[in-house]
Image (cartoon, rainbow, N blue to C red):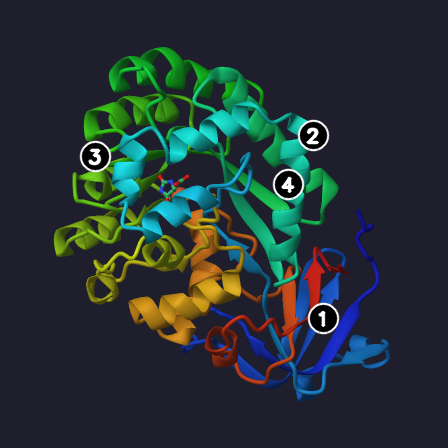
Amino acid sequence: MPAPDVYPHVYTEASLATMQPDAGDYGLLNDAALVTEGDKIAWLGPMADLPRPYATTAKTPLGGRLITPALIDCHTHIVHGGNRALEFEMRLQGASYEAIARAGGGIVSTVTATRDTSEAELLAAALIRADALIREGVSTIEVKSGYGLDLDTELKMLRVARQIATQRPLRISTSFLGAHAVPKGAGADSYIDTVCIPALRAAHAEGLVDMVDGFCEGIAFDVPQISRLFDVAQALGLPVKLHAEQLSNIGGTQLAARYNARSADHVEYATEADAAALAQSGTVAVLLPGAFYTLHETQKPPVAAFRAHGVPMALATDWNPGSSPLGSLLLTMNMGCTLFGLTPAEALAGTTRHAAQALGLTDCGTLKAGKRADLAIWNVKTPAELSYGIGINPLHTRIFAGAQT
Ligand code: DI6
Ligand code: FE
């Protein structure tokens, strides 16, 4: 891990997409400079206003390149064993995601593979995925459990997630997703009460849990079952988030709002009333176009209603072996625009400021003096270019906690 740099770094001849709220689409500053000291942003503004003390410091001229906050992937399942290429082939021949899940494939097949994979092998595979995101200027990744569905494997997954941050210059937020699927041979109610909730308590006791997540869906858990889990989360002082309204509407979004969830994710089938509830509770809607694309969905999330009600929208890869084997947050931004109709400014807010909000992080996601110096410097001049390219990676340099990495 590189030691934090204590000397000021002065970046000049840059455009800054500060992503400050209420500063216009991108909070854009042209002909600007940005100074980092240690792991923080010390100053930013027009080059002409660069404070005296920095005038004599060595500078890094960026030739008009764009600086944004480093990107944040706020919904991933990058710790998992095996892959589901076979199901991809089955879906191409007409089998639906739900039919495959009900026949014992889907999430449950990744559970078998994850149980059978050692901690070291899970970590090695997760690091390869994390590296792909790092190469695109990502500084922070949320990582879920949920392919264990037993105490030992759920804890194994969360330990691996924590270890990623010891092996790479990355910040990791963990979500306990024990309520992801009903394991083979179990009943949903007894699974929640006798396996999932005890596993949550054990994982929390080991300091492995930052948030609690669930899958509220016809093929997974209903509102009363998720409520029981969320009651325990609340008693433990843990914030919640929820996979809600992905394939149908069974009330998950309203449930998330009642528990002041940090985010409600997927939300394709959310309604106007659901949008109003999210606005009320200050919950972020996390849109996951990778799953929409992979599953050939046609129901789009109600973006117009989210805008009308002022619901912050984030974008994430949902990187998982089944519904979203998508390893690019930049491509996710393009898909958010092309498939869901977001503007490129909304897409960038969705992978910076709003993604930070979805994780409860207040020290990153925008460019401002005092925030962490987690930055991405791009070989582009205008921020819309980040969403416009398809499979193009214009990253020039990633700065993590003030250090070039
Ligand atoms: N929704 C998703 O998109 C992932 N989990 C979930 O609840 C899918 C996980 C998988 O198919 O393995
Ligand atoms: Fe997911």
Q: Which residue occupies the foreground of this view, 226 or 299? A: 299
- Counting other residues with Cα less than 10 Å from the Cα at mark 1, is it few (<14), some (14-19), or many (20 or more)? many
* SS assignment at label 3: loop
Do labels 2 and 4 touch, CB within 8 Å? no
Instruction: Indicate which disc residue 286 carries.
Output: none
Position of residue 171 in the picture relative to residue 199 (left or right)? right
- Amino acid type, callout 3: Gly
Pointer 3 or 2: first along the chain: 2
Q: Which residue is mark 3?
A: 218
Q: Quadrant of the C terminus?
A: bottom right
Residue 47 vertical placement versus 371 (above, below): below
Do labels 3 and 4 touch, CB within 8 Å? no
Q: Which residue occupies the foreground of this view, 151 or 107? A: 107
Q: Which residue is mark 1?
A: 35
Pointer 3 or 4: first along the chain: 4
Do labels 3 and 2 touch, CB within 8 Å? no
- Is residue 177 something that shows in the picture? no
Residue 127 in the image: state x and y as whole percent: 66, 44
- Amino acid type, callout 1: Val
